[in-house]
Amino acid sequence: DRVQQDEPLLQQLLNQQEKLRQEEREQKRLQEEEQEQRQRRLLEQEEETQRQAQLLRKQHEQEEQYHEHLQKMQREREWNLRRLQQEQQEREKRLIQQQEQLQRKQLQREQ
């Protein structure tokens, strides 16, 4: 008779035990999902960080190329300016020489 009385209690304990196991499995599943989500977010953040770093490197490289281009253009301008000044000086020198020559010829004629 005692066994019959204990049977519902035993069944109730078994049910509670099963319910606890289910809750533990559900808790574990949720924790694993959260961990996966955290890992996914970290991976996405890492990828974004690498992408940003790549963009910054590319931008820096372009800025360097632009700066080098500007320096090259500046050197070319300076060289052209020196060349033009030199040509101008040579033209002025020739003009002075031609004027002196003309003056000498005129002087010779007058004599």
Image: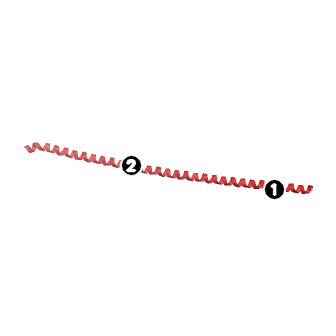
In this view, 76 is above or below 15: below
Q: What color scheme is it?
A: secondary structure
Between 103 and 29, the one nearer to me in the picture = 103
Please tell me how crowded label 1 is: few (under 14), some (14-19), or many (20+) other residues with Cα within 10 Å. Answer: few
Query: Residue 111: x percent and y percent?
Result: 92, 56
- Nearer the viewer's eye, disc 1 or disc 2? 1
Amino acid tagged 2 = Leu
Query: Residue 70: x percent and y percent?
Result: 61, 51
Which residue occupies 78% across, 55% down? 93
Q: Is residue 82 left or right of residue 96?
A: left
Secondary structure of the residue carrying numbered label 2: helix
Which residue occupies 56% across, 53% down? 65
Nearer-N-terminus badge (1/2): 2
**Which quarter of the rendered picture does the N terminus lie within?**
top left
Which residue occupies 61% across, 52% down? 71
Which residue occupies 11% across, 43% down? 6
| Marks 1/2: CA–CA distance | 82 Å
Please tell me how crowded label 2 is: few (under 14), some (14-19), or many (20+) other residues with Cα within 10 Å. Answer: few
Q: Is residue 29 left or right of residue 81?
A: left
Which image quarter: residue 83? bottom right
Between 66 and 17, the one nearer to me in the picture = 66
Q: Is residue 30 left or right of residue 97?
A: left
Amino acid tagged 1 = Gln
Indicate which disc residue 78 carries: none
Secondary structure of the residue carrying numbered label 1: helix
Indicate which disc residue 42 carries: 2
Q: Residue furthest front?
A: 111
According to the picture, the residue beneath numbered tag 1 turns out to be 97
